[in-house]
Amino acid sequence: MRVLVLHSHPVEESYGRALYRTTCNALETAGHQVDGCDLYAEGFNPVMSAEERRIYHDYPENTLPVQDHVARLKAAEALVIVTPIWNFGFPAMLKGYFDRVWLPGVSFALEDGRLTPTLSHIRKLAAVFTYGSTPLRAFLAGDPPKKIVKRVLRAQIRLGAPVTFLAHYDMNNCTEETRQAFLDKVQRKMDRF
């Protein structure tokens, strides 16, 4: 299976980068074709320009500024997102990716005011997140990133596609043991992805 792995962390030596490497390695070992997309390392520009906004609804012209990323998304049969959660949201880099790449004509069709998802070629979805907050605090805040994965993104891919959600909460109080245990869990889940 062709798996697009999106990663968004600026620090090479971060735990987030270790999760990304573990995810990619486990998927490759399991026999998947992995397209590792490290947004920071690739120098992705998350800022939508005024011209991009003007042509936002004009497919396929709207895809020209990000055509390589659109091609990668369209080629994917599965999607895995590996990212920290900052302030109960995605880092600006990842949010910008969704704003600039998941465009009309790419992730949805908009005809006569009716939206139709167009990513049915994506048959599996997984998220590997780290949170500074505890699970309770995330729950009380509504856990928007979890809802984006389990509701918004799930609604844009193949109907009924399985979704795997993995989160290491309370990174502010984590230990080497909790980090290693989560790495091991990610490894096991990606081995069976």
Image (cartoon, rainbow, N blue to C red):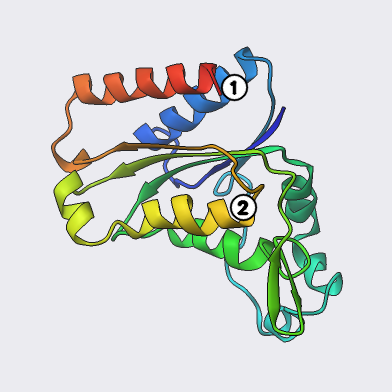
Mark 2 crowd level (few <14, some 14–19, many ≥20, 10 Å Cα): few
Query: What's the CA distance linking mark 1 and mark 2?
Result: 24 Å
Residue 47 is situated, as x and y percent measured from the top left of the image, at: 58, 70
Q: Which mark is residue 81?
A: none
Left or right position of 191 against 184: right
Mark 1 crowd level (few <14, some 14–19, many ≥20, 10 Å Cα): many
**What secondary structure is marked by label 1?**
helix
Residue on which the image places disc 1 = 27
Residue on which the image places disc 2 = 43
* Quadrant assignment for the N terminus: top right
Amino acid on which disc 2 is placed: Gly
Do the numbered discs 1 and 2 sit on residues whose CB atoms are within 8 Å? no
Q: Name the one closer to the observer, 164 or 31.
A: 164
Amino acid on which disc 1 is placed: Leu
Of callouts 1 and 2, the N-terminal one: 1
- In the displayed structure, 178 sits above or below 76; it is above
- The answer to whether one can see residue 14 in this image is no
Residue 133 is situated, as x and y percent measured from the top left of the image, at: 19, 49
